[in-house]
């Protein structure tokens, strides 16, 4: 505890340097298992800095990027003030094709959009943004996922008499609050006024997401030590006797237990790998 790994003290990487409350310590090891995490929530200790010591030894490491993250959207000041913090209950979001999409819940935030459905789609959204460049990428929100496009169209085109379009949408489709606000925010006046277009957009509302939220505030990070840099027991090919596990490796998974499960599983592989490595060299484990 309270030892920060500072990399290696010698050429053959068999001595580790640690900063400790009692000053710097050097520790010789027969095997070393690194599980130093990714780069999100650095206040919990994992800030990605440890990987610089591996890069310095020629290990292939891809820079960490946000994963399981929210995204920035350039909301208007009016929309942000009115709806930041509002949940979007039961929407579907499509990333690569306006049709279909995944049903779930998310949240409008001051900066953009977050929540479980967005986290689940964040890898695909990030990939799309990376391809689209600085202008960001469009995703499509289905504001009435429980209704078919035909049913939505029928309801929107139903005669509305003297009622405003907003109260018509509320009474026929229960579209009010943040969902109605999103329609106003993301459609032009003409689109909102044209019933055919409006009906189509209720089922596929384009929202432009600009960039992922900063890595420090997201749930996990993707990238890290490349699998090509490891052998089957999770030992670094460049640094025999040094094993890696957990989020520091280049994989990503949705939140909901998958990240932790993958970390534990890779920890098991690295642990067993280190034991085999020691056994092969006739080195017995010490109690300390
Ligand atoms: C807010 C939040 C919510 C999450 N929710 C979920 C969830 O619901 N389900 C899920 O599956 N996953 C979730 N995760 C992700 C999950 O917690 C991580 O993927 C997992 O903990 C990573 O495990 P790890 O052991 O690889 O790294 P970490 O848990 O980050 O542990 C790495 C440790 O190494 C230490 N360390 C770093 N550098 C050094 C160094 N140089 N010297 C010494 N020690 C060092 C750090 O202090 C830290 O204690 C969540 C993460 C966050 C931040």
Image: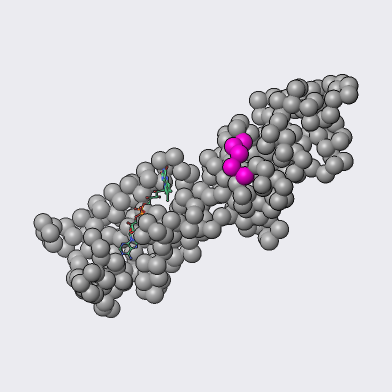
Which one is nearer the viewer's eye here, 48 or 57?
48
Q: Is residue 165 magenta?
A: no
Residue 1 horizontal/vertical position (percent) = 23, 60
What residue sits 62% from the left and 44% below the top?
A: 84
Left or right placement of residue 281 versus residue 110 in this view:
left
What residue sits 62% from the left and 56% below the top?
A: 211
Does residue 9 lie above or below 36 as drawn? below
Q: Name the residue at the bottom extreme.
A: 11
Task: Identify the image quadrant of residue 230.
Answer: bottom left
Left or right placement of residue 194 versus residue 97 in this view:
right
* Residue 275 in view here: yes
Residue 166 horizontal/vertical position (percent) = 79, 31
Report the span colored magenta.
Answer: 84-88
Task: Identify the image quadrant of residue 172.
Answer: top right
Give the main secondary structure of the magenta stretch: loop
Which one is nearer the viewer's eye here, 198 or 283?
198
Residue 215 horizontal/vertical position (percent) = 50, 58
* Residue 118 in view here: no
Task: Identify the image quadrant of residue 14.
Answer: bottom left
Looking at the image, how many numbered discs can be counted on the residues? Answer: 0
What residue sits 48% from the left and 58% below the top?
A: 216
Which one is nearer the viewer's eye here, 164 or 24?
164
Left or right placement of residue 168 versus residue 283 in this view:
right
Left or right placement of residue 132 versus residue 12 in this view:
right
What residue sits 81% from the left and 34% below the top?
A: 198
Query: In the rendered image, which quarter contains the C terminus?
Result: bottom left
Colour basis: one colour
Does residue 285 lie above or below 114 as drawn? below
């Amino acid at each position: 505890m309270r030892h920060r790994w500072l990399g290696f003290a010698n050429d053959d990487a068999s001595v580790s340097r640690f900063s400790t409350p009692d000053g710097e310590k050097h520790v010789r090891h027969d095997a070393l298992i690194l599980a130093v995490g990714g780069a999100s929530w650095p206040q919990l200790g994992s800030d990605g800095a440890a990987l610089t010591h591996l890069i310095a030894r020629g290990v292939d490491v891809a820079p960490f990027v946000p994963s399981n993250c929210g995204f920035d959207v350039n909301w208007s000041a009016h929309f942000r003030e009115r709806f930041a913090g509002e949940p979007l209950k039961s929407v579907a979001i499509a990333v690569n094709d306006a049709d279909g999409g995944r049903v779930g819940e998310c949240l409008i935030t001051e900066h953009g959009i977050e929540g479980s459905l967005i986290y689940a789609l964040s890898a695909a959204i990030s990939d799309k943004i990376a391809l689209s460049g600085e202008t960001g990428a469009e995703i499509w929100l289905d504001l009435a996922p429980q209704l078919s496009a035909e049913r939505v169209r029928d309801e929107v085109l139903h005669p509305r008499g003297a009622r405003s379009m907003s109260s018509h949408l509320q009474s026929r489709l229960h579209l009010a609050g943040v969902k109605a606000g999103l329609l106003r925010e993301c459609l032009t006046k003409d689109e909102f006024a044209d019933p055919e277009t409006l009906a189509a957009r209720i089922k596929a509302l384009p929202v432009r997401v600009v960039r992922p939220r900063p890595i420090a505030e997201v749930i996990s990070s993707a990238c890290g030590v490349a699998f090509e840099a490891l052998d089957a027991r999770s030992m670094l090919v460049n640094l025999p006797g040094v094993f890696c596990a957990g989020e520091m490796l280049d994989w990503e998974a949705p939140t909901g237990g998958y990240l932790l499960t993958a970390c534990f599983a890779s920890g098991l592989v690295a642990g067993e790998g280190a034991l085999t490595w020691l056994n092969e060299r006739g080195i017995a484990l010490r109690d300390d």
